[in-house]
Image (spheres, rainbow, N blue to C red):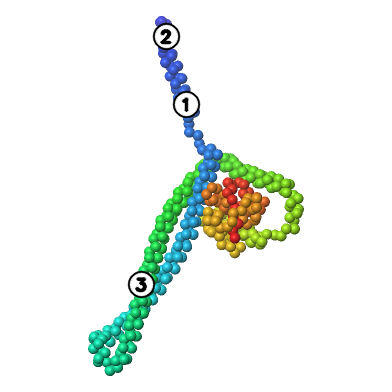
Amino acid sequence: MGNRRKPSPPSRARMAVLTTAMAAGGAVLASGTAHAEPGPTVASVKEQVDQLNEQAEQAIERYNGFQAKQQKLQSDANQIQEKVVRGQEAMNELRTRLGAVAADQYRTNGIDASVQLMLDSDPSGYLERAAVQNQIADSQAALLKQAQDEQRKLDQDRAEATATLAELDSVGKQLATQKSDIQTKLAQAQAMLNKLSAEDRAKINAQQSAEKAKAEAKQAAAAGAADRASRSDQRADLNAPVPAAGGRAASIIGFAQAQLGKPYGWSKTGPDSFDCSGLTSMAYRAAGVRISRTSQEQWKDGPHVDRANLQPGDLVFFYDDLHHVGLYIGDGKMIHAPRTGKNIEVLPISVMPYMGAVRPA
């Protein structure tokens, strides 16, 4: 058969190299697995969407303020332009009259006044006519100066209005760019939501519902404690007269209730959709009261009210910059237009950072 030599076993040094290499490979694989980038979590997606929605509402209120200011300045500019037209027409008429007077003076005063006096068959009549003509000239000169001064003032007003509108147009473009940027971010966040499984999306919806229910339970508990603590006082107040604002509050709240379920709409004041300040301003208008367009300006539309003294119809404000507003309806709740993608709803005022309340006069 012949002598076959058995293969010699690997040396200890070679075994050590192989063992080290295998261990290193395993470490690399383990390291790659440990440091793999995780996908977005439900919590991170929800947090990002919430942040973007808040940024969007801030931009919307600034945009609403711009629109209100632009509309007012446009109206002012139109009035100024009408004044300019009327002033120009008056000046044109005045110039025509002054031209006729100048022509008449030229015809009558074409020679030296003393010679004309000597040649005139009625010297006393000439002197009388000359005095009248001087009076007319002085009067026309005064009117002309007045018209020129008014024209100068109107030109300045028109230039100022033009400059202001140009500035507002620039601001409007900046806000439009900002709004577009936020819309892009919202679309990105929505895309992240769409990538989540149906189970994870259900978790987000359940979490939102749980937060709302928790706020309602907290509000109910606080209301129950207050009811027990002041039950005797409430009995004493059963026959108290209804506040004077009751009728107005009924109109305000009635309008808001009729909008429940309608979608939130950027910079909309109805009738099919509303943003937060659009809903409150139109609810007050339904009661015959005009308030400002934006939430920040509505904060200045009346006396501030303590939280303990809230009444139905009061405006309630949220967040440090007052970029959200709702209508208080009693029992610690409000009607508000929440944000893009949601509908007008009833919500406890404790669910957001509460800043205060206003009762417009």
Q: Is residue 6 left or right of residue 201?
A: left
Name the amino acid type tagged 3.
Answer: Gln
Q: Position of residue 31 (x, y in %)?
A: 47, 26
Q: Nearer the viewer, mark 1 or mark 3?
A: 3
Q: How far apart are labels 1 and 2 at the CA level?
A: 36 Å
Local SS, label 2? loop
Q: Which mark is residue 8?
A: 2
Name which quarter of the figure residue 133 lies in: bottom left
Which comes sooner in the sequence, label 2 or label 3? 2
Label 1 close to label 3 by CB (< 8 Å): no
Residue at numbered disc 1 = 31
Q: Is residue 8 left or right of residue 325?
A: left
Task: Where is residue 300? Give x, y as percent.
Answer: 55, 56
Residue matched to label 3:
148
Q: Give the left or right position of residue 248, taking residue 275 as reference.
A: right
Circle 1 SS class:
helix
Q: Quadrant of residue 206?
A: top right
Residue 283 screen position, x and y as percent: 59, 59
Q: What residue is shown at x 40% (from left), y 57% (from top)?
A: 167
Question: What amino acid is found at the position of numbered circle 1 in the picture?
Answer: Ser
Which residue is at the front of the view, 139 or 33?
139
Estimate the spatial distance between the alpha carbons at disc 1 and disc 3, rounded to whole Å: 86 Å
Q: Quadrant of the N terminus?
A: top left
